[in-house]
Every structure is written in structure tokens, then in C-alpha cells.
Image (cartoon, rainbow, N blue to C red):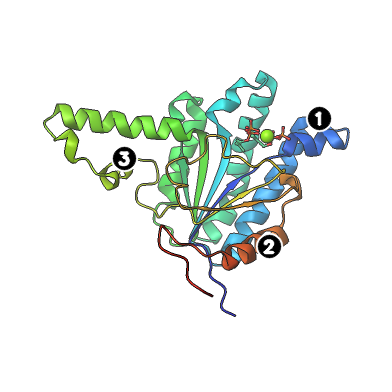
Amino acid sequence: MTIVLPRHVAIIMDGNGRWAQEQGLPRVKGHQQGVVAVQSAIEAAVQHNIEILSLFAFGQDNWKRSSNEVRSLFELLWMSLKREMPQIIKNHIQLRFIGDLSRLDQPLRTNIERTQQLTAKHTGLKLIIAINYSGRWDIVNAARTLVQKVQQGEQAGSVTHEQFAEQLALSDLPDPDLLIRTSGEQRISNFMLWQFAYTEFYFTSIYWPEFNQQTFVEALQTFSKRQRRFGLESSAS
Ligand code: IPE
Ligand code: IPE
Ligand code: MG
């Protein structure tokens, strides 16, 4: 049987806090263990020749959390970026960030920009990290740009959904084929609202720190059995 692989896999990495709490550990330990799971996900994606891996690392709604938790999440990001650079370079990974980076501290932004420039020509896995991202923010941003174009004389009535999509964060890449969400929650939580129009969803009850290559393979196998129709009639298989 030929296995149909997704080109683009998106992941909502959820359940770090519950994983830690169930073991009597502070939530930050869950986030630390979550970084190990990120490494597994990247390795699995590379091994299965996935073209694009998009990880939801921090949503705009996550600013509502305690300042301690927010600080430790950004510290972890900073440290992971530094520590993982040799691996990223060795594996020719192209690292890109989406989200409103203007709210981040300047040193982190500089680091992010430098990393993006350094890896821009890499031809391996495209790794997208969503930080201070929200699907609604992405759509509103696109709408703002289009409003400006209309003010400059473009006909509002002739704007197509393709032109709209060109203004979104990942406009140069195909939409995710597969979304994986851990921790048993079955929702999108303001991730890629537009881009998930025809994405296949795979929900698993394991917490993010428990995610490993086996989980990734299970998600790929489930995806391979799905019949994607994009509005067409069903076909006997
Ligand atoms: C995901 O785990 C990490 C982020 C949202 C940054 P959570 O921290 O949401 O874990 P739970 O959902 O509280 O268990
Ligand atoms: C979604 O997880 C955001 C990230 C994984 C970064 P949340 O834990 O914040 O989502 P809700 O609040 O349960 O919907
Ligand atoms: Mg959560």
C-alpha cells in the first residue's frame, strides 16, 4: 500500500501544564519537557520527508497567563534557539517565525531575525514557529493591507480569495494538510483559521511532553487513510 504523506503538518502542542501537574511538578517543567517533544517532532518530520512543519508555540491569547509562566516560555524559546542552531544548520532546516513579533523583547527579535536570515537559503525542512500568532490577527492584517490597496484605487469588488490569501502569513506555502493536536482538546484555539479550510484533523489524548516519533507515525497513517474531497463527490475506494 502506498502511503500518502502530507506536505505540510501543523501541530498545536498542548498539555504541558497538565502533564506536569499530574506528576506534582511545576508547570514550567512541563514546558521544558515540551521542548524535548519539539525535537522529536522535528526529527520525525525530517525522517518522513515532510516539507513543512508548523508549530504553535505561543498564541496571542496566551498573554493572559501569569507573568511568571509567560517569562519562562520566552526564556525557553531563547535558550532552545541557541542550543538547537547547530542541529538546524546540520539538517539544512529553514526556520521561519510567524506572528506579531513587534511585542517581543528586542534581543529576542534580533535573534529571531538573525536566525531567519541565516537559514533562509536552506533547502531542508521548512520549520515554522508561530509566536504571538493568532488566526484572527492574521486575517485582520490581510484585510488591512487590502483596504490600503482599495484606497489606492484597486476595485474592492474584484478582490479574490487568492489575492486575500496572498496577504496572509504563510502565503508562499501550501495550506496544512494535517493538523495534530495533543492533550485531548478538540479545537483550533485561534491557530490558522483561514489555512485550515481543508486540513485533516488528528486529535490524540496524550500530552505534548509525551509526543514522540510513534505518535507522529500514527498521525501520518491516519492521514493516509482519509479521503480528501475538497468539495468533489466521494469516490469508491
Ligand atoms: C501548551 O501547553 C503550551 C502553550 C500553550 C504555550 P499548556 O501550557 O497549554 O498546557 P495545559 O493545556 O495547561 O495542560
Ligand atoms: C493553544 O493552546 C496555544 C498553543 C499551543 C500555543 P492553549 O492551551 O492556549 O489553548 P486553549 O486555551 O486550551 O484553547
Ligand atoms: Mg493548553
Q: Which residue is mark 1?
A: 26
Mark 3 crowdedness (10 Å alpha carbons): few <14, some 14-19, many ≥20: some
Q: Which residue is mark 2?
A: 218
Comparing 106 with 156, the one in front is: 156
Foreground tag (2 vs 1): 2
* Residue at 47% across, 32% down: 109
Please, what secondary structure does the residue beneath circle 1 have?
loop
Q: CA distance from mark 2 to mark 1?
A: 30 Å
> Quarter of the image containing the N terminus?
bottom right
> Quarter of the image containing the C terminus?
bottom right
Three-letter amino acid code at the position of disc 1: Pro
Q: Position of residue 18 (x, y in %)?
A: 78, 35
Circles 3 and 2: CB atoms closer than 8 Å: no
Q: Which residue is mark 3?
A: 167
Q: Position of residue 176 (x, y in %)?
A: 48, 53
* Residue at 75% across, 32% down: 28
Q: Is residue 110 left or right of residue 91?
A: left
Please, what secondary structure does the residue beneath circle 3 have?
loop
Q: Is residue 72 left or right of residue 236?
A: right
Looking at marks 3 and 1 on the same chain, the residue that comes earlier in the sequence is marked by: 1
- In the displayed structure, would residue 47 be above or below residue 204? below
Q: Position of residue 95 (x, y in %)?
A: 48, 49
Three-letter amino acid code at the position of disc 3: Gln
Q: Position of residue 153 (x, y in %)?
A: 11, 31
Q: Is residue 125 left or right of residue 160?
A: right
Looking at marks 3 and 2 on the same chain, the residue that comes earlier in the sequence is marked by: 3
Within the displayed image, which quadrant is ligand 1 positioned in? top right
